[in-house]
Image (cartoon, grey):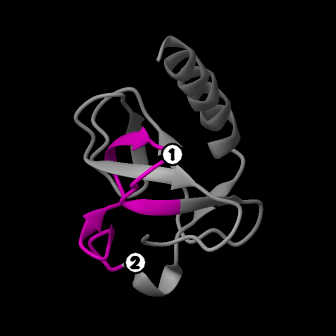
Amino acid sequence: MKYFLSLSKILSSAILISFHLIGTSIDANKIDRVCTFQGKPIYGKIKIVKNFPDIRVQVVDHFPDIKVKIVDSFADSCGEWKMTDSFPDIKIEYVTSAPGER
């Protein structure tokens, strides 16, 4: 478990750096005006999981569906994510293809 948490923190740090340069693809056709994807918010406290995600996310270099900004507090605007290990608003899984709801 400690290995996973350490790897998770390293991955989160790498993602923090990369999100400032690239966007995230979820499925633009399903993101509504209040920044939700099929009823799930795309902002707030986010936990990265390997199993049973709420949304599958693909990191892309061009034409993102949403631009993500990692914040330290108050992730209350569209695309603002605060990474957490407990009590997330939404759980995501990073994929290389077929983003969206699982």
Q: Quadrant of residue 78?
A: bottom left
Q: Position of residue 90 (x, y in %)?
A: 31, 51
Q: Position of residue 91 (x, y in %)?
A: 37, 49
Q: Is residue 96 or residue 31 the one in the foreground?
A: 96
> What whole-number distance in Å separates the C-alpha atoms at marks 1 and 2?
23 Å
Residue 55 is covered by the magenta coloring: yes
Q: Where 28 falls versus 66 (above or below)?
A: below
What residue is disc 1 on?
50
**Label 1 Cα neighbours within 10 Å, binned few <14 / some 14-19 / many ≥20:** few
What residue is disc 2 on?
31
For marks 1 and 2 on the same chain, the one whose residue lies earlier in the sequence: 2
Give the residue drawn at x 32%, y 41%: 75
Give the residue drawn at x 63%, y 22%: 10
Q: Which residues are magenta?
A: 32-56
Residue at the farthest right position: 61
Q: Is residue 39 or residue 4 the one in the foreground?
A: 4
Give the residue drawn at x 36%, y 60%: 54
Q: Which mark is residue 79?
A: none
Residue 91 is covered by the magenta coloring: no
Amino acid under disc 1: Lys
Q: Position of residue 12 (x, y in %)?
A: 56, 30
Q: Where 1 falls versus 35 (above or below)?
A: above
Residue at the farthest bottom position: 29
In which quadrant of the rendered image does the C terminus lie? bottom left
Q: Position of residue 96 (x, y in %)?
A: 71, 61
Please tell me whether mark 1 or mark 2 is closer to you in this view.
Answer: 1
Q: Where 42 falls versus 11 (above or below)?
A: below
